[in-house]
Image (cartoon, rainbow, N blue to C red):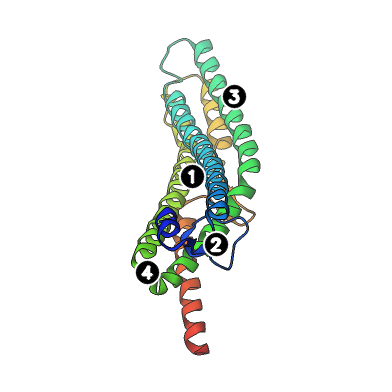
Amino acid sequence: MVAIQMESKGEIDPTYITFFWLWPTEPLKGKLIVYPYVTLQWFYAFGGVCYLMAFNTTCGSVVIGLGGQLEVLCEMFRRALDTDVKEEQERNLIRCYKRYIDLQDTHNTLDAIMSPVLFMYLLVASINMGMILYSLPTLEKSSMYTSMILVSSLVVEAFYFFWHGHEAMYQSEIVSAAVYGCDWVDKSPHIRRLVYVMSATTNRVLVFHAGPFNEVTVITFISIVKVTYSFYKLMTTTVTHGS
């Protein structure tokens, strides 16, 4: 579109350039001005997209990986007493419990790192979705399609994070039941005592956070959608009454 406008009209409308660093308010004229500026914006946009992709991939992998590790841990607890050797039973339980403590520490560290960034993403995504929905009726058809794709992408991306965060939380909730689910009934009093203590101390729910108030769960995702729609209705109502 930029090339077509430049070759046909000799200028470029700022509204046709998606990513702007220093937003021009007047049409840009002259190839020596337009093409270098568009090239700069392309590199600026490319760098931003690469950064977002790297962050999204890393965060998603971390959350999915933790959920998978918790699922493996549950199975390890269930099979910890599948041997008849008492010393081996005790070693299996202790090894599983140490793994649980390591996963707790890993979760705490990762949550502290990702929480501020996820909060900013949650805030920016909610506002962007509301603003885009509000501006849809005034856009041309091509811009409308682009905006709808952007809103859909934001919704899918948010759902991706919050779904896997919810999965990790669910896996942490069933660790205690997995400990109790091992074959402990006919074991020695010492082993049964270990099972009881571990079952009682592995009931902590591991939840990722997006800021100080929001948990990374499906419930929070539903709240985001509701807030976005409320923001959209508020802007629509305010403009209607102002007119």
Residue 206 visible to the viewer: no
Q: Which residue is mark 1?
A: 165
- Disc with the residue nearer the chain's start (1 vs 4): 4
Q: Nearer the viewer, residue 72 or 22?
A: 22
The image shows residue 214 at horizontal and vertical percentages of 57, 55
Q: Which residue is mark 4?
A: 140
Give the CA distance from mark 2 to mark 3. Answer: 63 Å
| Point 49% across, 68% down: residue | 131
Above or below residue 76? Residue 31 is below
Any part of residue 29 in sight: yes
Say what amino acid the circle numbered 2 marks: Leu
Earlier sequence position, callout 2 versus callout 1:
2
Nearer to the camera, 157 or 222:
157
- Say which mark, if any, is on residue 98: 3
Kind of residue at disc 4: Glu
Q: Residue at x 56, y 58 (%)?
A: 124
Q: Secondary structure at mark 4?
A: loop
Under circle 1, the secondary element is: helix
First in residue order: circle 1 vs circle 3 = 3
| Mark 2 vs 4, N-terminal side | 2
Q: Is residue 192 left or right of residue 104?
A: left
| Amino acid identity at mark 3 | Lys
Question: Mark 2 vs mark 3: which is more N-terminal?
Answer: 2
In the image, which disc is placed on residue 86? none
Could you tell me which secondary element the residue under label 2 belongs to?
strand
Percent position of residue 19, x then y: 53, 55
Residue that mark 2 sits on: 28
**Which sits in the foreground, 40 or 148?**
40
Separation of marks 1 and 3 at Cα, in angstroms: 23 Å
